[in-house]
Image (cartoon, grey):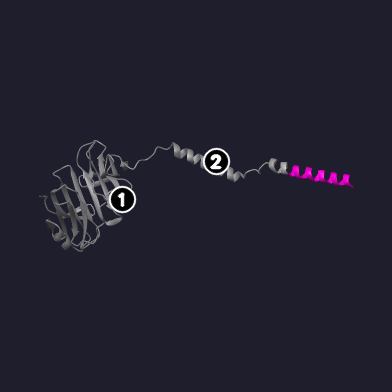
Amino acid sequence: MALRRAVIAAAVTAAVAFSTVGAGATPAPPRSPVVRATQTTQAAQVAQTAERPAVTADEPVCVRIKGAQACVGPDGSDRPGITVEDTADDRSHPAVEYYLNGYLGTQYVIHNLARHGEVRGNREIGRVVTFRAALYQGDHRVRYGRWKTVRNMAKYPVKRETRTTPAEARAKSRTCASTKNAATVCFSERKTFVYACDTRADEYQARAEYFVGGDPTTRFEIHQLAGLGTCGRAEHGELSVSMYRASVYDHSRRRATKGYQYN
C-alpha cells in the first residue's frame, strides 16, 4: 500500500513538472496577417516621414503660372506678406489677386509693373488669405491660375472689416475722392489705410486704384463687390498714398473714372 502511494505521488509530481515546463515552452500563437501588414505599413510610413525634409514656419507658400509667381509668407520669410514676382521677360505684367479672412465682398489686386525678376507686394495680410497669380496686358487679364488658401501666416493679421459705410469711411479718413457719385476712395496717412466704397445701386463695381510710397512700379486695387453702401479696406503700414483715383467697372471694362490725383 505504501509502495502504491509512492508511485502515485511520483506520477503526480512528474505531471506537475511537465505541465510547468510545457507551459513555458509552448510557442505564442502566430500573429494575424492583418496585424503584420498593419505594422509593416506603419513602419514604412514612419520611415517615409523621417526621410521627408522638415518644412519650417518661415517658408512662404507660392503658386505659379507662366510669367508669374505669387507667394504668401510670414514675417521671418524672404517674402513676408503677399508678393508677386515677374518671371518672364515679355510685354505682360504679373499680378496677385486675393481675398482676406474668408470674405468675398472685397477683392484686392497688386500689379507688379516693374521688370523681369522683380518682386512687389504688401506686408499687411489677414489671418486667412485666398490668392492666385494672374497675368495682365494693360488692364486686361490674359491668364490666371488656381486659387489657394493659407492660414495663420501673419503675426499681426489685418482684421476683417465689412460694415463700414461710405459716410463712416469719410469720417475716418483725411482725403476722399469720388467718381460720378458711384465710387469713392478715401484714405488716411497714419498707419495708412485706404477705403473703396460703392455709392450707387447698379450692376457696376467700385474700385480704388492707387500707388503708395512714391513707387510707380506697383499699382494697388480694391474691388468692392458687395454692393451699395459698402466699403472695402486695405492697409499699408507706414507707406503713404502717392497717387489715387476712384473708378467704376463692369467686370474688366472701365465705365467711369477721372485722372489720377496726386497726394
Name the one closer to the observer, 145 or 109. 109
Disc number placed over residue 40 in the picture, else none: 2
What amino acid is labelled 1 in the image?
Thr
Secondary element type, mark 1:
strand
Q: Is residue 246 magenta?
A: no
Name the one closer to the observer, 127 or 121. 127
Q: Is residue 7 magenta?
A: yes
Q: Is residue 72 left or right of residue 263?
A: right
Q: Is the residue under label 2 in contact with that under label 1 (CB below 8 Å)?
A: no
- Span shown in magenta: 1-19
Question: Which residue lies most toward the left here?
Answer: 262
Which residue occupies 48% across, 38% down?
Answer: 47
Q: Is 248 drawn above or below residue 25 in the view shown?
A: below
Q: Is residue 162 left or right of residue 2?
A: left
Residue 225: percent from left, percent from top: 24, 57
Secondary element type, mark 2:
helix
Name the one closer to the observer, 88 or 122. 122
Q: Which residue is mark 1?
A: 130
